[in-house]
Amino acid sequence: MTTYAIQPAAPVTLPIEGTDKVFPVARVFCIGRNYAEHAREMGHDPDREPPFFFMKPANAVTTTGQFPYPPGTSDVHHEMEMIVALAKGGRDIPEDKALDCVYGYGVGLDMTRRDLQGEAKKLGRPWEIGKAFDYAAPCSGLKRAADIGHPVDNRITLDVNGKRRQDSTLNKMIWSVPETIAYISRYFELLPGDIIMSGTPEGVAAVVKGDTLVGEVEGVGRLEVVVV
Ligand code: MN
């Protein structure tokens, strides 16, 4: 039996609607610039620069409904996204088999220290300081694909203090869910428990302490988060 020198961290989990089980999160892959209008609002040309991915640590995932305003920044943005949770992994997964890997779906916020991310971009440095900080991924619970199928054109919205900030549909994603899974699996062996944040539509903006964020992908999930 293994004896740990220190207490190992508890697994990060997401609740699953309609079951008493929880989903253990392995890694968090995030897709950048997966909606053309968001790429444009960030100053990029989606016809010339395809989406790409980056990661957050699993322990950035939080389901408490609270987002502690992070240190070292004065420009924290919301990015409302659909989450894809994998029950199966693999390498070189073909697009037409990719959805067989999906356990379920949820919604999440890819919270971003935009000022620090911008500085990192300018200096050609990694993005972790802007994207991978503590509590940077408030998430909803999951719904099983076995129950809801695979969402394709559902509406994705985010309201801040009752005012709509983001409003789009999943079919505007440049990389579809199967394309994303196939793409990542060419570079990494995907694992059961990996989740994918599938990218944000246009309308990203700053939050301040006291804001209430309500994000929804119709038929998939709803998330309410207070900035504290
Ligand atoms: Mn994002």
Image: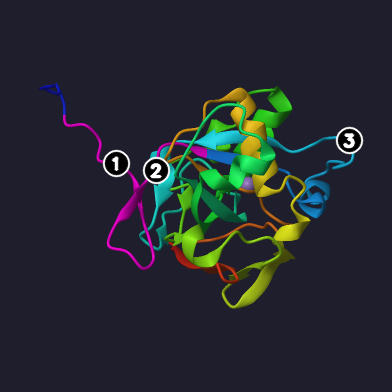
Residue type at mark 1 is: Pro
Label 1 or label 2, whichever comes before in sequence order = 1
Calculate the distance from the C-alpha at mark 3 to the C-alpha at mark 1: 39 Å
- Residue where numbered disc 2 is placed: 25
- Give the image location of residue 127, x and y in percent: 60, 31
Q: Please tell me which residue lies in front, 167 or 177.
A: 177
- Residue where numbered disc 3 is placed: 48
Q: For the residue carrying disc 1, how many other residues have a C-alpha within 10 Å: few (<14), some (14-19), or many (20+)?
A: few
Label 2 or label 3, whichever comes before in sequence order = 2
Residue 185 is left or right of residue 52, and the answer is left
Q: Please tell me which residue lies in front, 202 or 133.
A: 202
Calculate the distance from the C-alpha at mark 1 to the C-alpha at mark 2: 7 Å
Question: What's the magenta region?
Answer: 7-28
Q: Please tell me which residue lies in front, 70 or 197.
A: 197
Quarter of the figure with the N terminus: top left
Q: Nearer the viewer, mark 2 or mark 3?
A: 2
- Residue where numbered disc 1 is placed: 11
- Give the image location of residue 117, x and y in percent: 63, 37
Evaluate if marks 1 and 2 touch, with contact meaning CB atoms under 8 Å apart. Answer: yes
Calculate the distance from the C-alpha at mark 2 to the C-alpha at mark 3: 33 Å
Q: Secondary structure at mark 1?
A: loop
